[in-house]
Amino acid sequence: MTEQPATIIVDWGTTSLRASLVSALGTTLDTIETEGGIQFIRDGQFETALMTAIGNWFDQYGLLPVLAIGMITSRNGWVEVAYVDAPAGIGKLAGGTRSITLGNGAKLTFLAGLRNPAGQPFPDVMRGEETQIVGYGLEQNRTLVLPGTHSKWARIEDGRIERFQTYVTGEIFALLVKHSFIARSAVESDTIDWRAFDRGAALAGDESPTSDALLAAVFSARTGMLEGKLAPAEIHDYISGLLIGSEFRQARSVGWFRDGDTLGIVGNDGLNERYERVALLFGLTTELGPDDAAKRGILLVAEYNAGGSTSAI
Amino acid sequence: MTEQPATIIVDWGTTSLRASLVSALGTTLDTIETEGGIQFIRDGQFETALMTAIGNWFDQYGLLPVLAIGMITSRNGWVEVAYVDAPAGIGKLAGGTRSITLGNGAKLTFLAGLRNPAGQPFPDVMRGEETQIVGYGLEQNRTLVLPGTHSKWARIEDGRIERFQTYVTGEIFALLVKHSFIARSAVESDTIDWRAFDRGAALAGDESPTSDALLAAVFSARTGMLEGKLAPAEIHDYISGLLIGSEFRQARSVGWFRDGDTLGIVGNDGLNERYERVALLFGLTTELGPDDAAKRGILLVAEYNAGGSTSAI
């Protein structure tokens, strides 16, 4: 390979460990994925598990620095890293990291999650998504949405993540299609039915007050079938559109965007196209972030520290 | 017994069969409950199953008329009874029944469900709740709520059920506490924590736009715990209050009630006290229906037919 390994990034979650070998230019040279999530680690044997996963890279390339994100930095992980409070830019996030030295002498740095003390009714939290936001870029004042099981809306102001809010849209979708009355009648399909998706989103985006009644609108998955207006194969995408549309409607009601705004969309969990489509329906212009936003963000935070700078931003 | 059996009421659902022996005055003299729901009936052997359940009553008391409600009247049941369209009063509901004669000569009448053709985005349906509404009484122009897995809001106007709307509140609650991130951290309790319930309801009832964002508010079950503001044992009732409060907020947005209205509450699934409490929070006066509203309604519909009257109401 022409580029040399410079850093190891470890995304260590509850159910899996994913590691990337990255060059100084940010190119991913190799990856490893194991099912050794932190829930399977007994008696705090995190270092043993880490060495089993990435020890070969140390043997081949020397004592590369390791950057860790994910639930490994939580109370149930290896080292609990306190959340950094928003507003926060790269400097403040970098200041919140915690480092240890591994038995072989390599440095392992745990990145901090982000807390929004202004969240209502309680301060909100994210652990990992902040790296995606940094990787998207903090240059422009803008609202971003990060689609996911627990999607995040975040505001960038003056080079910092100003505040953010979590929506449990993806989880509600999964619950409905797996365990509810919908699960008993809907039929899964391999392709996205954009027509059905748009119908659901349009219902949520409608100007009528009916569209505010999400708890009632969900029942239209059944009444639509009873009336022969929705086919069993359309239900999943109809409900997906209805829920993402409701997320936008609710996000608008609390001021995350106005008609005509540009919305950044960043994430890599396959939902971006759905969010883009709904954003257009709500009168927004969209700008997609890079696919490797998380990696970019992690490296930017780490480089800030390596540069020896400190900052209150 | 002093009162003589006059009617047999059968509530035959997907998973169970419940039968009541009722006097001419509406007194329940005996009950039977079996797990012989319609999903367990093979090859259309409904009559055999019914005779096994209530044959003794025929032997003892003669060929009493039988009134049947529940999924037994649906497409998957014994006799599919078409929905009656709202607006509908007792006469129109009575006109929608279908009767057959059993092998022993007794008359079996299946009651109709109700359809709201004005429902948005599709006509709404109920199958059984309409008897509770009739049993509550159609004398006064009033909005009723029938708490449940799929709660119903209904409007009584001029002695008829004018229109109604279904909210899937109870099902969303069950999904969240059984299968979501909440299930992993909440602790079930034997008693209702009214303080936690009220906190959730107050969040939904708040005048701030934040309270419109239900998909975000649900996440407060996690952030409240992370911040030490909600205990694991409080989560279930907090979420219950939040969801029922959101149902009221959404019902108000589509015009089901205004501040100062009287709201009828009818149902017997243990949720009435919760709904009453939230109704007060939303500035409503409440009037609870009788516990035996369903039985009263069934008998009123049946008596209308027995009286030989017909009506377009």
Image: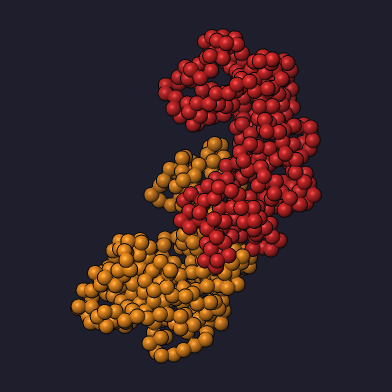
Chain colours: A orange, B red
In the picture as drawn, the residue positioned furthest to the left comes out as A60
Q: Work out which quarter of the rendered image holds the C terminus of chain B and state it.
A: top right
**Is residue A77 found left or right of B74 in the rendered image?**
left
Q: Residue B234 at what x, y percent from top left? A: 57, 56
Q: Report the residue at 40% width, 66% height from top.
A: A76
Image-quadrant location for residue A25: bottom left
**In the image, is A90 to the left or to the right of A253?**
left
Residue A261 vertical position relative to residue B195 in the rendered view, above or below: below
Front-lying residue, B291 or B128: B291
Residue B79: image quadrant is: top right
Picture quarter with the N terminus of chain B:
top right
Q: Where is residue A192 shown, x and y percent of the image?
A: 43, 52
Residue drawn at (50%, 55%) of the image:
B186
Residue A47 spot, x, y in % from top left: 29, 72
Q: Is residue B164 visible?
A: no
Residue A185 horizontal/vertical position (percent): 47, 40
Q: Residue placed at 57% from the left, 69% from the top?
A: A123
Above or below, comparing residue A112 to residue B249 in the picture: below
- Kindly identify the residue that appears in the image at 49 percent across and 74 percent down: A83
Task: Locate residue B134: give its quadrant.
Answer: top right
Residue B292 in view: yes
Count of numbered labels shown in the rendering: 0
- Residues B126 and A278: in front is B126
Q: Which one is in front, B257 or B114?
A: B257
